[in-house]
Amino acid sequence: MIVDLSLSLNEETPVYPGDPEIKVRPWAFIDTDGYYMNVIKMGEHSGTHVDAPAHFVPGGKTVDELPLDKFIGKAFVIDVRGGEGPVRLEEIPDSGYYGKIVLFLTGGRELSPEVALFLVAEGVKAVGTDHMTIGDETTHTIFLSEEIPIFENLANLEEVLGREFTFIAFPLKIEGGSGSPVRAVAILG
């Protein structure tokens, strides 16, 4: 079974304050042009997307420079919706992270730098959140300095809560990209 963990991209898709709005405009129509196509204008961090190190780390790798194995792996979801403020270390399990992609069901909360440092020390492969941002600049820099991709704006995490699954979210190969939209999925069974 495959669960779609991605937001739909359209002009109503929320963007981070100050980021470019998503614009979708028709370019060609079957009845007049013989084919159908749209023009899409958006920032690299629109919708469900991945942050590459270059997003916060001077000289960091761009999205096209990261190995593809960073975007696929065994994953699980941690539900931290019950708390308030930044997610604290005592709210998450104390083991089981090495080599895994750890996704957070936050209800709009951000990870604290303390949690980011812990997850890096535990050897996570990648992290993700249902929120527009994983956390503040410090939290981003902690992960991205270690070339740990950050997936943001994930959807439907409730559907895979309590289960281990294979997570796949490949970016577009944007040369020099600080990030990229992704089609994130969970493969169960």
Image: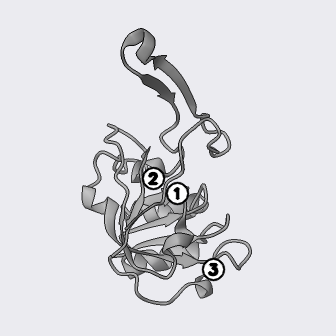
Pick whichever, 98 or 138, lies toward us: 98
Circle 1: element type: strand
Q: Would you name the residue on which mark 3 appears?
A: 88
**Dot placed on the residue nearer the N-terminal end, 1 or 3:** 3
Image location of residue 168, percent across then percent down:
35, 61
Q: CA distance from mark 1 to mark 3?
A: 19 Å
- Name the residue rendered at 67%, 71% in the picture: 86
Q: Which residue is mark 1?
A: 152
Type of amino acid at the residue the image marks with label 2: Asp
- Kindly identify the amino acid type of the residue bearing the numbered disc 1: Glu
Q: Residues within 10 Å of mark 3 (few under 14, many from 20)?
A: some
> Would you name the residue on which mark 2 appears?
51
Q: Is residue 157 above or below residue 4?
A: below
Q: CA distance from mark 2 to mark 1?
A: 8 Å
Q: Give the x, y percent position of residue 146.
A: 38, 65
**Residue 109 as seen in the image, left or right of residue 158:** right
Alpha-carbon neighbours of circle 1 within 10 Å: few (<14), some, or many (≥20)? many
